[in-house]
Image: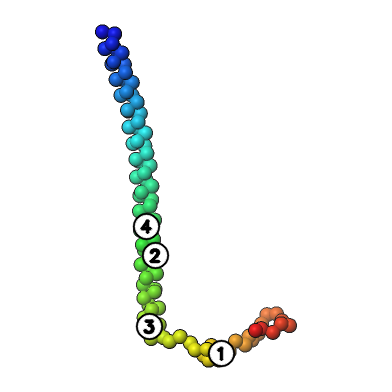
Amino acid sequence: MFSKVKELATANNTIKNLNATLKYAEEKAKKADKLVAELEKEIEKANNEVEKHGKEFEKVKSKTESAEPMTKEDVDAIDITIYKADTQSTEEIK
């Protein structure tokens, strides 16, 4: 009979340990669910930003599809004279 009491005590101890493990796992699962929900919100925000930038990209792309790169002559012909500078400089801009 004493062995049965010992066996039951061991079983009760095992049950207590398993219940504690289940409680810990449940807490971790709730925390994981919360983190997943936060991550899903961030992904949704990122997807919205990508969509927004994609639309802007398409606008610019359609405006510049037929554009040609500037030649060296085009670049050299750009007037880079600075008028009404706030401060005077003794250095020449190169």
Find out whether the residues at labels 4 and 3 contact each other: C-beta distance under 8 Å.
Answer: no
* N-terminal label among 3 and 1: 3
**Residue hosting label 2:** 49
Name the amino acid, label 4.
Ile
Q: Compared with residue 50, is residue 18 higher up or lower down, i.e. above or below? A: above
Q: Can you say which quadrant of the picture contains the C terminus?
A: bottom right
Quick one: label 2, few (<14), some, or many (20+) residues within 10 Å? few
* N-terminal label among 4 and 3: 4
Name the amino acid, label 2.
Glu
| Closer mark to the observer between disc 2 and disc 1 | 1
Q: Compared with residue 72, is residue 87 higher up or lower down, i.e. above or below? A: above
**Residue hosting label 4:** 43
Circle 4: element type: helix
| Closer mark to the observer between disc 4 and disc 3 | 3
72 or 9, which lies in front?
A: 72
Spatial CA distance of label 4 from label 1 is 46 Å
**Residue hosting label 1:** 76
Spatial CA distance of label 4 from label 3 is 31 Å
Spatial CA distance of label 2 from label 1 is 38 Å
| Closer mark to the observer between disc 3 and disc 1 | 1
**Residue 65: which numbered mark, if any?**
3
Name the amino acid, label 3.
Glu
Image coords of residue 78 (percent x, y) = 55, 89
Circle 3: element type: loop
Spatial CA distance of label 3 from label 2 is 24 Å
Residue at x-position 37% and y-position 33%? 24
Viewed as shown, does residue 56 lie left or right of 75?
left
Q: Compared with residue 46, is residue 23 higher up or lower down, i.e. above or below? A: above
Outermost residue, top side: 1
Residue 9 makes an appearance in the image: yes
Q: Quadrant of residue 33?
A: top left
